[in-house]
């Protein structure tokens, strides 16, 4: 198990290239199950979560080839049972349910367990599959889906904490081959949902409204192979902008999609950072006075829950009192105890963190608990005094391609140590 040592106090300067979006690539790879033809997906990031998805596809019978960022999948003959051993490693494995049900009218996939950011139910996905005509059974830890045929339906996917991103993707993937029209109300508006809809449309699906709260899908008989390039990862982009904010002289993210970063750019501007942008880049310079923030995570286009931990790190290093409210995953504050070990002053009250900025954090041994929480610890360590030792970094490798190397190229001093 690797650990990361961050030698704090170096300032960052330069350009960093953003990779393809993990959260887009995962359902898009699952969608290749919907056709017997070859699909070619470009800009697939090299991450352990992607590796798990490719392993699941192989075990379902797909031919999978990968050369640098390009993945080719041919799902000529497939099985409908995804093995527990792999599925249990990644919650996003549930996004093979929709395409398996759509194409084979059957699926058997292990029920994902809870994770540190909450119990993460999939009731809304299952409600949607039932509405399309599937029988849903949970037995022996597996979800079994079966249908004679799938029929279009009107489905509301809004839950207690808002819309569901993977749930919207799953229902779209099942509905593209259903008979008749499906209308998803309360759909997630995230750019990753739009990217998936673009890929499904390239395969011959008939989808309109992706990117709004209502998506309409007219079922077709068959889908064909397609080529697709995954959108830039907006969370990786946001994380490097926060790196620039917390420890930078001037950092430019390139090959990004600034349009997808609206709420994050606004928060950084409100906090007093200078931002300049082109169509595919954003430069952050830490000039001027800092202002504390009141942030609330909200489904897209609101401020993303996947950037909450990184902003907690940033706000811990800025003068004044900030308040961060988590509405999407109310329990997602595992990073707070670790940031406190580094000297941060944070009061947690239910789903709200009150952060009093301190002059300087100090390096400490800390534990990565989930993907974005780990990123927050790396960010907090950049300006900290001394060395921060971050254990369990496999969490960070799930979602960031070589974050240590990319930060080192900007001037950080990070070592990866095999334990
Ligand atoms: C996706 C992202 C994740 C991000 C999250 C919210 C991927 C691989 N992951 O996760 O990085 O943090 O969106 O932007 O794309 N919920 C239910 N019932 C359900 C499904 C969800 O109650 O059936 C709740 C969840 O517990 C949560 C909220 O709805 O409170 C949003 O979750 P959801 O959008 O489904 O998250 P994911 O799609 O799993």
Image: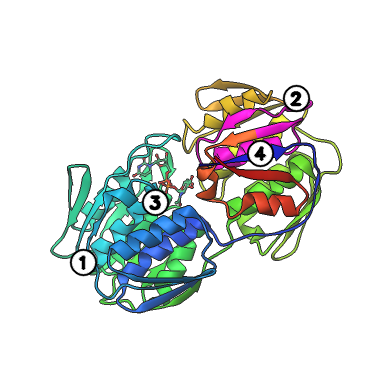
Where residue 241 appears, x then y in whole percent? 70, 49
Tags 2 and 1 touching, CB below 8 Å: no
What is the distance, in whole Å, between disc 3 and disc 4 at their CAs? 29 Å
Can the viewer see residue 269? no
What is the distance, in whole Å, between disc 2 and disc 4 at their CAs? 22 Å
Residue 5, numbered label: 4
Instruction: Please determine whether, in this image, residue 353 is positioned above or below residue 40.
Output: above
Residue for point 79% across, 26% down? 359
Q: In this view, does 219 lie to the left or right of 266?
A: left
What residue does disc 2 label? 358
Where residue 58 appears, x then y in whole percent? 33, 65
Q: Give the range drawn in magenta.
A: 359-388
The color scheme shown is rainbow
Q: Give the residue at the far right of this rendering.
A: 288
Residue for point 59% across, 30% down? 366
* Magenta span contains residue 385: yes
Badge 1 or badge 4: first in the primary sequence: 4
Ligand 1: does it lie within 8 Å of the C-beta at label 3?
Answer: yes
Q: Residues within 10 Å of mark 3 (few under 14, many from 20)?
A: some
Badge 2 or badge 1: first in the primary sequence: 1
Q: Is residue 124 left or right of residue 234?
A: left
Tally of numbered discs:
4
Badge 3 or badge 4: first in the primary sequence: 4
What residue does disc 1 label? 104
What residue does disc 3 label? 92
Q: Nearer the viewer, residue 54 or 164?
A: 54
Residue 252's quadrant in the figure? bottom right
Residue 384's quadrant in the figure? top right
Q: Nearer the viewer, residue 245 or 362?
A: 362
Ligand 1: does it lie within 8 Å of the C-beta at label 4?
Answer: no
Can the viewer see residue 419? yes
């Amino acid at each position: 198990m690797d650990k990361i040592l961050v030698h704090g106090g170096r300032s960052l300067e330069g350009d960093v290239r953003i990779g393809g979006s993990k959260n887009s690539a995962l359902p898009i790879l699952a969608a290749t199950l919907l056709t017997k033809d070859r699909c070619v997906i470009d800009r697939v990031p090299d991450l352990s979560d992607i590796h798990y998805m490719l392993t699941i596809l192989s075990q379902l019978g797909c031919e999978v080839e990968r050369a640098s960022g390009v993945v080719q999948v041919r799902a000529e003959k497939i099985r409908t049972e995804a093995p527990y051993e792999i599925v249990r490693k990644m919650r996003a494995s549930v996004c093979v349910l929709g395409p398996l049900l759509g194409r084979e009218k059957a699926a058997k996939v292990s029920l994902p367990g809870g994770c540190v950011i909450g119990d993460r139910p999939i009731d809304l996905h299952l409600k949607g599959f039932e509405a399309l005509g599937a029988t849903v059974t949970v037995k022996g830890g597996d979800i079994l889906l079966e249908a004679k045929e799938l029929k279009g339906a009107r489905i509301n996917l809004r839950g207690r904490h808002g819309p569901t991103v993977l749930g919207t993707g799953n229902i779209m993937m099942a509905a593209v081959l259903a008979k008749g029209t499906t209308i998803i109300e309360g759909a997630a508006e995230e750019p990753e949902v739009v990217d998936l809809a673009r890929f499904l449309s390239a395969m011959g699906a008939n989808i309109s409204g992706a990117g709004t709260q209502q998506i309409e899908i007219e079922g077709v008989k068959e889908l064909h192979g397609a080529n697709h390039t995954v959108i830039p990862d907006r969370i990786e982009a946001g994380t490097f902008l926060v790196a620039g904010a917390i420890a930078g002289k001037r950092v430019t993210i390139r090959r990004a999609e600034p349009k997808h970063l609206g709420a994050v750019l606004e928060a950084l501007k409100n906090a007093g950072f200078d931002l300049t942008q082109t169509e595919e880049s954003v430069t952050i310079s830490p000039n001027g006075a800092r202002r504390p923030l009141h942030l609330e995570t909200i489904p897209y286009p609101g401020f993303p829950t996947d950037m909450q931990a990184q902003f907690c790190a940033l706000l811990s290093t800025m003068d004044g009192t900030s308040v961060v409210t988590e509405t999407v995953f109310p329990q997602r504050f595992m990073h707070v105890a670790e940031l406190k070990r580094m000297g941060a002053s944070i009061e947690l009250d239910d789903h709200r963190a009150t952060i009093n900025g301190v002059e300087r954090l100090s390096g400490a041994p800390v534990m990565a608990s989930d993907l974005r929480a780990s990123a927050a610890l790396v960010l907090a360590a950049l300006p900290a005094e001394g060395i921060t030792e971050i254990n369990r970094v496999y969490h960070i490798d799930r979602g960031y391609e070589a974050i240590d190397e990319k930060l080192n190229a900007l001037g950080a001093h990070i070592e990866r140590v095999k334990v």
